[in-house]
Image: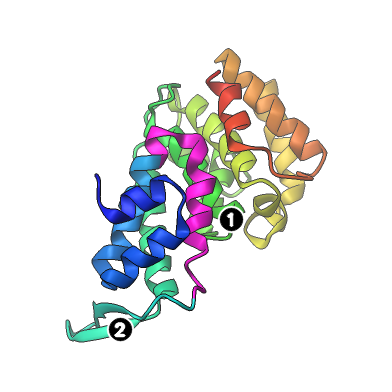
């Protein structure tokens, strides 16, 4: 991909992204942001927060015109970019969660999805029940019926995904309403996973201990995504 949107986003240049949208204020241009986000994040997962921050900054930019789209009846319509972005990013989030490949590898899109979603949460770009549900299920919270979602060889990757997701979301994922009302369950759940030896990958164990340490301190600050990713993949 080498479109103006992709090139601008790859250099974290919000001004250039705005100009690209102004040149073609169409739904397809905004949708391209989601595709570029996904491609760039899969190439460098630890850059997801920088990308999300640029996109989040578009929501209230006064220089961006209304976006051309169609209504329910397929008639021409115009809507604010924040409405289109909400749909595009939420669709992206749902897609990246879809394939829970069990491999503990840096190219596993399921593991990358934890950083993408966490970055969206920490920057305020998207914080939904679908995202928190992935965390609570991965942590085996009571009421999640996690055993219907994963078992066997997938148990480890879901636990690692949840730890990555928590660390990437940071302060906001822990304290805001999606997880916040159940934050007292986070630390016991992480410790139970560690004690039950759900995670056998040595780097995965280190990541789990990092998540436990942050939960014990009640997630006082956001760890850099690069530092989080390097725990698992040095």
Q: Quadrant of residue 85?
A: bottom left
Give the residue number, with chain letter if any, for mark 2: 78
Side (left or right) of 54 relative to 173: left
Res 185 → quadrant:
top right
Residue at screen point 36% across, 66% down? 19
Question: Any magenta on residue 42?
Answer: yes
Name the secondary structure under disc 2. strand
Is the residue 54 above or below the residue 211 in the image?
below
Whether residue 199 is visible: no
On the image, the x and y values in percent for residue 16 come to: 39, 59
Q: Which residue is mark 1?
A: 123
Residue located 44% across and 41% down the image? 113
What residue is rendered at 70% in x and 28% in y?
210
Q: Give 64 or 124, whichever is nearer the viewer.
A: 64
Badge 2: residue crowd in 10 Å (few <14, some 14–19, many ≥20): some
231 is higher (above) or lower (below) than 65: above
Please identify the quadrant where the N terminus is shown.
top left
Q: Is residue 7 left or right of residue 126?
A: left
Residue lying furthest right: 217
In this view, the residue in front, 164 or 192, is 164
SS state under label 1: loop
| Residue 160 sits in quarter | top right
* Secondary structure mostly seen in the magenta stretch: helix
In the figure, is residue 215 to the left or right of 32? right
Residue 225 located within the stretch drawn in magenta? no
Range shown magenta: 41-61
Residue ID at (49%, 56%): 54
**What is the total number of numbered labels drawn onto the structure image?**
2
N-terminal of the two: label 1 or label 2? 2
**Horizontal and vertical percent for residue 183?**
73, 50
């Amino acid at each position: 991909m080498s479109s103006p949107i992709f090139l601008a986003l790859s250099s974290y240049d919000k001004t250039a992204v705005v100009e690209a949208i102004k040149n073609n204020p169409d739904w397809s241009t905004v949708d391209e942001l989601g595709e570029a986000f996904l491609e760039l994040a899969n190439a460098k997962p630890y850059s997801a927060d920088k990308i999300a921050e640029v996109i989040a900054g578009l929501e209230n930019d006064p220089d961006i015109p209304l976006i051309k789209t169609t209504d329910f009846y397929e008639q021409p319509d115009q809507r604010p970019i924040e409405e289109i972005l909400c749909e595009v990013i939420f669709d992206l989030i749902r897609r990246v969660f879809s394939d829970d490949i069990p491999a503990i590898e840096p190219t596993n899109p399921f593991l990358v999805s934890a950083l993408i979603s966490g970055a969206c949460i920490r920057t305020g770009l998207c914080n939904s029940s679908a995202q928190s549900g992935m965390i609570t299920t991965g942590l085996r919270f009571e009421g999640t019926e996690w055993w219907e979602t994963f078992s066997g060889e997938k148990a480890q990757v879901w636990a690692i995904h949840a730890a990555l997701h928590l660390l990437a979301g940071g302060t906001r994922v822990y304290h805001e309403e999606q997880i916040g009302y159940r934050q007292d369950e986070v630390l016991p759940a992480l410790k139970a996973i560690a004690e039950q030896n759900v995670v056998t990958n040595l780097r995965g164990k280190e990541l789990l201990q990092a998540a436990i340490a942050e939960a014990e301190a009640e997630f006082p600050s956001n760890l850099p995504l690069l530092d989080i990713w390097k725990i698992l993949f040095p």
